[in-house]
């Protein structure tokens, strides 16, 4: 997964989390938070992979 896709997943999760909070839908809010955190973890993994590639040069 690319960093851009990971950031898009974070944004989608944040929107879902905010919508869940506004509608008092705890399940949607939790799903959004999970999606946002998954996207953040994927972004960190991509950054680590990039650093590893750079250090091998």
Image (spheres, grey):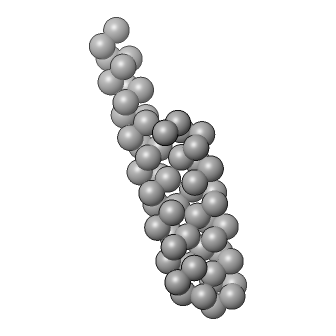
For the residue pair 56 and 1, the one nearer the viewer reads as 1
- Residue 56, position as x, y percentages in the image: 30, 13
For the residue pair 40 and 1, the one nearer the viewer reads as 1
Q: Which residue appears farthest toward the left when viewing the image?
A: 56
| Residue occupying image coordinates x 69% and y 84% | 22
| Residue occupying image coordinates x 63% and y 60% | 12
Q: Is residue 2 above or below residue 7?
A: above
- Residue 33, position as x, y percentages in the image: 51, 70
Please identify the quarter of the rendering in which residue 15 is found: bottom right
| Residue occupying image coordinates x 57% and y 79% | 28
- Residue 52, position as x, y percentages in the image: 32, 24
| Residue occupying image coordinates x 41% and y 26% | 50
Image label count: 0
- Residue 34, position as x, y percentages in the image: 46, 67
Q: Is residue 49 left or right of residue 16?
A: left
Q: Is residue 8 above or below residue 28?
A: above
Q: Which residue appears farthest toward the front when viewing the image?
A: 1
Q: Is residue 33 left or right of residue 22?
A: left
The quarter of the rendered structure image containing the C terminus is top left
Q: Which residue appears farthest toward the bottom when viewing the image?
A: 24
Q: Is residue 11 left or right of residue 55?
A: right
Q: Is residue 8 above or below residue 22?
A: above
């Amino acid at each position: 997964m690319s960093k851009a896709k990971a950031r898009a997943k974070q944004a989608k999760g944040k929107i879902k989390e905010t919508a869940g909070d506004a509608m008092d839908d705890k399940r949607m809010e939790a799903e959004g938070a999970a999606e946002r955190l998954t996207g953040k973890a994927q972004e960190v993994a991509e950054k680590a992979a990039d650093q590893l590639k750079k250090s091998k040069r």
